Image (cartoon, helix red, strand yellow):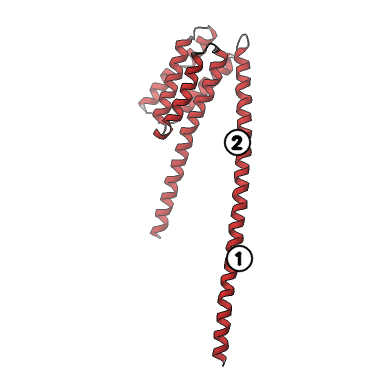
């Protein structure tokens, strides 16, 4: 009789455990959905903030470039920052890095824009060289997007509305967005390598 009671008790207890686990799983999944929704909402807000900041930044840059005289100091600093961002992707002993450090001559660029010696051909060479190196340093999967950003700048340069004050902000925005993609891909690759190494280490234990 005692054994029968124990069996009946077990038959009742097992489904109850399963029910509890199902409830926990349901609440866990619901919590995950709430968290994911919050993350997506925050990412959307962050993107809106970043987009607003970028627009304000490049609107101000265009305003400063339109001034007479233009804000040469700021333009030169942005040129130097672009050089730094591109060359930092390479090792100091890299031949390509040495090439870029030589061609992105900050002092010469500053002198040229101040003396109005930086013409349309110089701008064209800067645009094409910068995007070419960006494609060279980035993932092949990004080439189409990078080329589209380059073409947007070149198309604008050929338009009747194009002036130095509109070309410079567009170029700096598009090339920096392209460089951002290179850095993002490198960060993603580093994370993937670290996670793969962690899985291998865990499997050996």
Query: Which of disc 2 and disc 1 is earlier in sequence?
Result: 1
- Whether residue 59 is situated above or below residue 1 in the rendered picture: above
The residue nearer to you, when weighing 118 against 112, is 118
Residue at 63% over, 29% down:
53
The residue nearer to you, when weighing 100 against 174, is 174
Looking at the rendering, in which quadrant would you find the N terminus? Answer: bottom right
The residue identified by callout 1 is 23
- Element under label 2? helix
| Quadrant of residue 9 within the rendered picture | bottom right
Task: List the single residue furthest toward the front.
Answer: 160
The residue nearer to you, when weighing 16 against 121, is 16
| Quadrant of residue 57 within the rendered picture | top right
x and y, in percent, of residue 122 in the image: 45, 12
Q: Nearer the viewer, mark 1 or mark 2?
A: 1
Residue at 57% over, 91% down:
2
- Element under label 1? helix
Question: Are there few (<14), some (14-19), or many (20+) residues within 10 Å of tag 2?
Answer: few
The residue identified by callout 2 is 47
- Whether residue 23 is situated above or below residue 133 in the rendered picture: below
In 3D space, how far apart are the residues under numbered discs 1 and 2 (Cα atoms)? 36 Å
Residue at 62% over, 16% down:
64
Residue at 44% over, 26% down:
147
- Whether residue 190 is situated above or below residue 130 in the rendered picture: below
Question: Are there few (<14), some (14-19), or many (20+) residues within 10 Å of tag 1?
Answer: few
x and y, in percent, of residue 38 in the image: 63, 47
**Left or right, residue 169 beside residue 131:** right
x and y, in percent, of residue 121 in the image: 45, 11
User: Do labels 1 and 2 touch, CB within 8 Å?
Assistant: no
């Amino acid at each position: 009789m005692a054994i029968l009671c124990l069996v009946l008790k077990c038959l009742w207890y097992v489904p109850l455990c399963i029910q509890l686990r199902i409830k926990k799983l349901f609440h866990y999944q619901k919590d995950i959905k709430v968290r994911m929704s919050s993350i997506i909402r925050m990412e959307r807000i962050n993107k809106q903030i970043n987009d607003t900041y970028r627009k304000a930044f490049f609107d101000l840059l265009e305003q400063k470039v339109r001034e007479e005289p233009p804000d040469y100091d700021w333009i030169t600093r942005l040129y130097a920052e672009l050089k730094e961002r591109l060359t930092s992707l390479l090792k100091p002993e890299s031949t390509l890095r040495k090439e870029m450090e030589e061609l992105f001559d900050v002092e010469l660029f500053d002198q040229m824009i101040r003396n109005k010696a930086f013409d349309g051909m110089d701008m064209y060479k800067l645009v094409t060289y910068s995007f070419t190196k960006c494609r060279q340093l980035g993932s092949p999967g990004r080439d189409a997007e990078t080329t589209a950003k380059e073409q947007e700048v070149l198309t604008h340069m050929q338009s009747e509305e194009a002036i130095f004050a509109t070309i410079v902000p567009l170029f700096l925005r598009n090339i920096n967005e392209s460089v951002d993609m290179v850095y993002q891909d490198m960060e993603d690759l580093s994370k993937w390598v670290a996670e793969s190494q962690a899985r291998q280490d865990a499997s050996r234990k």
